[in-house]
Amino acid sequence: MKMKIVCFDIGGTNIKYAIVNDINNLDVKSIDTRVTKDDNHILEDILKIVEEHKDADAVGISTAGVVDSKKGEVIFSGPTIPKYAGTKFKKIIEEKYNIQTFVENDVNSAAFGEYSYSDYSGSMFMLTIGTGVGGSLILDGKVFSGASMTAGEIGYMPLNDGYFQDYASATFLTNYVSERLSKKVDGKYIFENAKNGDELCIDAIDKLVYNLCTGILNIIYMINPDNLVIGGGITAQGKYLEDKILEVLEKRIIGKQFKSNVRLANLKNSAGIYGIYSITRKEMK
């Protein structure tokens, strides 16, 4: 039986959403994430879209931040989305519209979507590269949440004088080049110019890849998952990026017995929508 599910994937840069009647016929739309220096308007924008689909059977929300999936609220958020912790999506939407609502961390959703709709066997760790860096571990076909629902938050792994995501995110890449050019550039500009031989852009990507591989190696050494999958908007670079990552890993790994199947995600930037749809269908009463 087909059901109408309103699915959201909330990130630091944009909010993707889809009104899903058939997961095989997905039409994903996107709006900017409205964030100011000291506030955000995410809940307001989510409610506007739900208001237009009050006949939905359920709402599924995949979001950045640490999520208490039982309560359906954000319990911690980094500086990329100010005043986001404490956002009670489930309580507010269910009380206002009487629509079942399910909320999950964005990386957990992406990992579950990738695992559910791709051909993987065994365990999987998914690393997502975007405004920050996130991680999720799939064990026995389920998201491993940890003791306080914070498992996989590798972006906060200490590195140098900061965090892993300070050196391995798309934000690091764009800031590195923008500061040296004294103008704001985006990832598309950097990769296009690198492919045309621009030394600064090549250097920036090489630094990003080296830093990213530091995190990947730590995951392999500590967890040794069957599959280590890299997702997020950066995967649009495909084989160009994947080849660079595999080359650095081969040079830096201490032995061939430390092995995981490292690859880019199949579902690219829609994995979060697929994942929250699957989670919502699974949890619906």
Image (cartoon, helix red, strand yellow):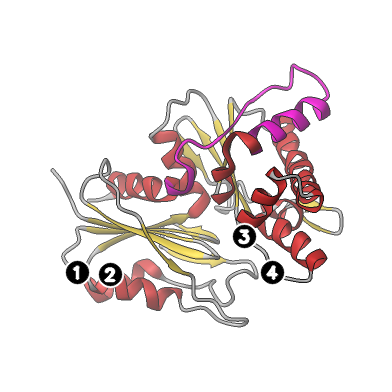
Mark 1–mark 4 distance (CA, rounded to whole Å): 40 Å
Report the number of discs.
Answer: 4
Counting from the top left corner in percent of width and height, residue 125 is at 58, 36
In primary-sequence order, the first of circles 1 and 4 is 1
**Local secondary structure at mark 3:** loop
In primary-sequence order, the first of circles 2 and 3 is 2
Quadrant that contains the N terminus: top left
Disc 2, disc 4: CB below 8 Å? no
**Local secondary structure at mark 4:** loop
30 is higher (above) or lower (below) than 254: below
- Looking at the rendered structure, the kind of residue marked 4 is Lys
Image quarter of residue 185:
bottom right
Q: Disc 2 designates what residue?
A: 50
Q: Disc 3 designates what residue?
A: 131
- Looking at the rendered structure, the kind of residue marked 1 is Lys
Q: Disc 1 designates what residue?
A: 54
Question: On residue 184, which mark appears?
Answer: 4
Q: Residues within 10 Å of mark 4 (few under 14, many from 20)?
A: few
- Looking at the rendered structure, the kind of residue marked 2 is Val
Mark 2–mark 3 distance (CA, rounded to whole Å): 26 Å
> Foreground residue, 229 or 197?
197
> Foreground residue, 197 or 103?
197
